[in-house]
Image (spheres, grey):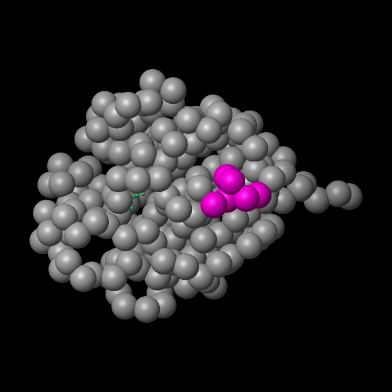
Amino acid sequence: MIKDGIDWEQLYQDKFTPWDVKRPDSHLADIVQNTPIRPCRALELGCGTGTNAIWLAGRGFDVTAMDLSATALAQARAKDGADACAFVLADFFEDPLPGTDFGFVFDLGCLHGFSNPEHRDMLARRIAQCLREGGHWLNISSSLDGQAVCPSRLSAGQITAAVEPYFEIVSLTATHLDNLSVEDKQEMGLAPDLPAPCAFCTLMRKRAPEQE
Ligand SMILES: C[S@@+](CC[C@H](N)C(=O)[O-])C[C@H]1O[C@@H](n2cnc3c(N)ncnc32)[C@H](O)[C@@H]1O
């Protein structure tokens, strides 16, 4: 299993999940509401406790949501609206691809968990294999800029190096991850004034096959 040292299942069991803001991601909502991306077959990679997958299904997307943590998926399946999603316990690197005709892939914090560039390249390649031609991938990754709030961080150059062989970049925007509530920070032993990590929000379109 490729984890680059992070034991995700253990973190969910320990209830130490500082990425789980328990509300739909603001960048995802902005992209779905303000770009031509329309309801289609969608894959959420590394869906965690399922908030964003359920939000997408509520907007008409036909959602498959994958994670390798059984604890996270049990929490996802217990949420209101979960029946509208297909939650899949699988390792995106080692298990068969969940399909090859998705129109949209969403990943918040999966790519940035891989410190090894070969693993990031493999992830981008496999996401491209899941998408139909012209399909989009929205990635939100914590960035190397600003205070080191999140241990997994990527530069814009590391993101583009991984994705550009397979994707055209539609937009790459410097932003912040959505912040945890003060109550959740306190529950996890984090400082109440901990800032939201700097991040990059990257929307990409799968490259068309090269013509002869
Ligand atoms: C930083 S967490 C983000 C979770 C969720 N997107 C959220 O924002 O709440 C990264 C997630 O990716 C999942 N993950 C990491 N590697 C994976 C893999 N190879 N296959 C499937 N899921 C993976 C982890 O279990 C974890 O839930």
Name above or below for residue 208 compared with residue 164: above
Q: Is residue 204 above or below residue 155?
A: above
Residue 99 at what x, y percent from top left? 56, 29
Q: In the orientation shown, which residue stands out farthest toward the top? A: 83
Residue, x 46% and y 57% (percent of image)?
140
Estimate the x, y position of residue 22 in percent, counting from the top left. 30, 45
Between 30 and 90, the residue placed more toward the observer is: 30
Q: How many marks are shown on the rendered structure?
A: 0
Q: Classify residue 134 by image quadrant.
A: top right
Q: Answer left or right for 105 relative to 167.
A: left
Give 95 or 103, whichever is nearer the viewer: 103
> Which range is magenta?
30-35
Q: What residue is rendered at 49% in x and 36% in y?
A: 56
**Quick check: is 19 in the magenta stretch?**
no
Q: Residue furthest right?
A: 212
The answer to which quarter of the image holds residue 198 is bottom left
Q: Is any part of residue 70 visible from this angle?
A: no
Indicate the quadrant where residue 167 lies: bottom right
Rendered residue at 15%/68% (across/down): 191
Q: Is residue 62 left or right of residue 87?
A: right
Residue 108 image point, x, y percent: 42, 51
Q: Where 200 falls versus 58 (above or below)?
A: below
Q: Main secondary structure of the magenta part?
A: helix
Q: Is residue 59 left or right of residue 66?
A: right
Horizontal and vertical percent position of residue 25: 42, 50
The quarter of the rendered structure image containing the N terminus is top left
Residue 201 seen by the camera: yes
